[in-house]
Image (cartoon, grey):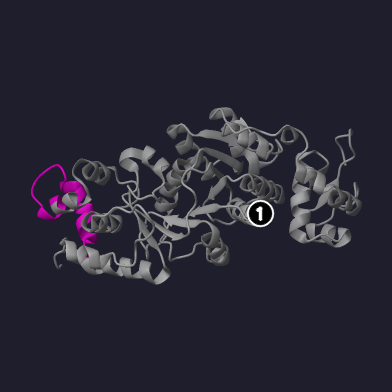
């Protein structure tokens, strides 16, 4: 293994093209050392965090490379196999190729909320995209990959309304609820942020490559793992702490009893973030995790964007406390939806869309809200029927 060069000239050359924006940390050796640390450690490595906080990133690297029998021996045995100059150079080259930026503590672009993680905070972050205003209110909206039409409908609408108020919507870009939240925020031209469990040069899931490109256009795609790093189960779990830390409030929209979203909720609770959940039908296993948040985490019951804005301490316009302006705009579409439903014959989302003349996604969103209001029910096979008001029965 060749020796890592921590001279100022080499450090400046190594990070060339990876920095940008105002107020960036000026010491190239310290910045380069943090990039190296991001290659050496797994997310949330507290031993690295404590050492770097004590002596700085560059001095900490020198301590590790010097070796010697000390309290760091076990940690050193984890880090040294990755201390390959060629591997570090490959990660930095991959970042340049995809247009990623290296962001370190002290930069204007560094999300200061992340510092609440203390020793478990990332040593550096990698970002694709423009970024979002660091002082803007931020809400993490999370939920299950195996989402229902109801869950995705709520996610799209909630994210759209929050983004329209100027709040930044944060999620994890996964299928299901996460993707619906990002799409909802983008639909209003609002800001949204995705945190990945692998490098920002490796869109994951692959089916969301286009969505991640759109997110990077108006917001940002972040990761603490270097470019080229693969998403792993541990990195997904550790990524959740960043989603929670980055936000002022965390809302679980739909989650099963053991959903990974509850891991994010747990981090939010430990960090003192405001925590809420969207209730679902009491018979739905897909919402059992949300009900756990309401019961075990003392979460706020969220039924509208106004509830989330109240969690953030924002002034809620009087009209938001009642019928949402979006609801009024959708009155005609809702009427068309119920014209296409039957209390006796269960119909698929596609059939409802065809009969009503609505786009499939729009029909799915409206069906989700109709289920929440008790005006429609879904059979086990996913088909829908209307419910007669006041009867509680189809």
On whether residue 81 falls in the magenta region, the answer is yes
In this rendered view, identify the residue nearer to me: 157 or 230. Answer: 157
What secondary structure prevails in the magenta region?
Answer: helix
Find residue 279 and report its horizontal and vertical position in percent: 67, 36
Mark 1, secondary structure of its residue: loop
Please, is residue 278 above or below residue 93 in the view?
A: above
Task: Report the residue at 15% width, 52% height from top.
Answer: 64
Q: Which residues are magenta?
A: 63-84
Find residue 337 and report its horizontal and vertical position in percent: 85, 52
Please, is residue 269 above or below residue 231 in the view?
A: above
The N terminus, quarter of image: bottom left
> Is residue 190 at least partly visible in the picture?
yes
Q: Is residue 183 left or right of residue 215?
A: right
In this rendered view, identify the residue nearer to me: 256 or 98. Answer: 98
Q: Quadrant of residue 121?
A: top left
Q: Quadrant of residue 353?
A: bottom right
Task: Report the residue at 14% width, 53% height from top.
Answer: 62
In this rendered view, identify the residue nearer to me: 263 or 394. Answer: 263
Q: Which residue is mark 1?
A: 188
Give the farthest residue toward the left. Answer: 68
Q: Quadrant of residue 250?
A: top right
The C terminus, quarter of image: top right
Q: Is residue 337 left or right of residue 263?
A: right
Task: Report the residue at 55% width, 56% height from top.
Answer: 174
């Amino acid at each position: 293994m060749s020796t890592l060069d921590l001279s100022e000239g080499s450090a400046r050359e190594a990070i060339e093209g990876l920095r940008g924006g105002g107020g960036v940390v000026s010491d190239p050796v310290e910045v380069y050392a943090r990039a190296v640390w991001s290659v050496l450690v797994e997310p949330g490595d507290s031993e690295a965090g404590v050492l770097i906080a004590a002596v700085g990133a560059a001095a900490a690297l020198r301590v590790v490379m010097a070796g010697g029998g000390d309290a760091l021996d076990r940690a050193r045995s984890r880090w040294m196999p990755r201390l390959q100059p060629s591997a570090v150079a490959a990660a930095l080259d991959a970042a340049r190729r995809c247009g990623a930026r290296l962001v370190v503590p002290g930069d204007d672009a560094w999300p200061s909320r992340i510092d609440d993680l203390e020793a478990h905070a990332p040593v550096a972050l990698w970002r694709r995209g423009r970024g979002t205003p660091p002082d803007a209110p931020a809400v993490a909206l999370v939920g299950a990959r195996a989402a229902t039409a109801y869950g995705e409908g709520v996610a799209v609408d909630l994210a759209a309304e929050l983004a329209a108020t100027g709040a930044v919507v944060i999620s994890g870009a996964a299928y299901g609820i996460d993707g619906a939240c990002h799409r909802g925020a983008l639909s209003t031209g609002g800001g949204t942020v995705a945190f990945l469990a692998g490098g920002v040069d490796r869109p994951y899931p692959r089916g969301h490559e286009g969505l991640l490109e759109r997110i990077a256009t108006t917001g940002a795609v972040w990761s603490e793992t270097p470019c080229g790093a693969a998403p792993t189960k541990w990195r997904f779990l550790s990524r959740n702490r960043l989603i929670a830390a980055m936000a002022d409030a965390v809302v679980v929209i739909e989650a099963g009893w053991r959903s990974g979203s509850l891991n994010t909720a747990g981090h939010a609770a430990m960090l003192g973030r405001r925590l809420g959940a969207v209730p679902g039908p009491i018979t739905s296993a897909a919402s059992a995790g949300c009900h756990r948040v309401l019961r075990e985490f003392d979460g706020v019951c969220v039924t509208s964007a106004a509830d989330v804005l109240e969690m953030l301490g924002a002034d809620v316009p009087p009209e938001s406390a009642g019928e949402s302006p979006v609801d009024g705009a959708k009155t005609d579409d809702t009427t068309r939806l119920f014209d296409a439903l039957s209390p006796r014959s269960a119909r698929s989302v596609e059939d409802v869309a065809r009969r009503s003349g609505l786009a499939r996604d729009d029909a799915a969103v409206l069906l989700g809200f109709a289920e929440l209001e008790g005006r429609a029910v879904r059979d086990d096979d996913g088909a829908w029927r209307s419910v007669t008001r006041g009867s509680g029965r189809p």
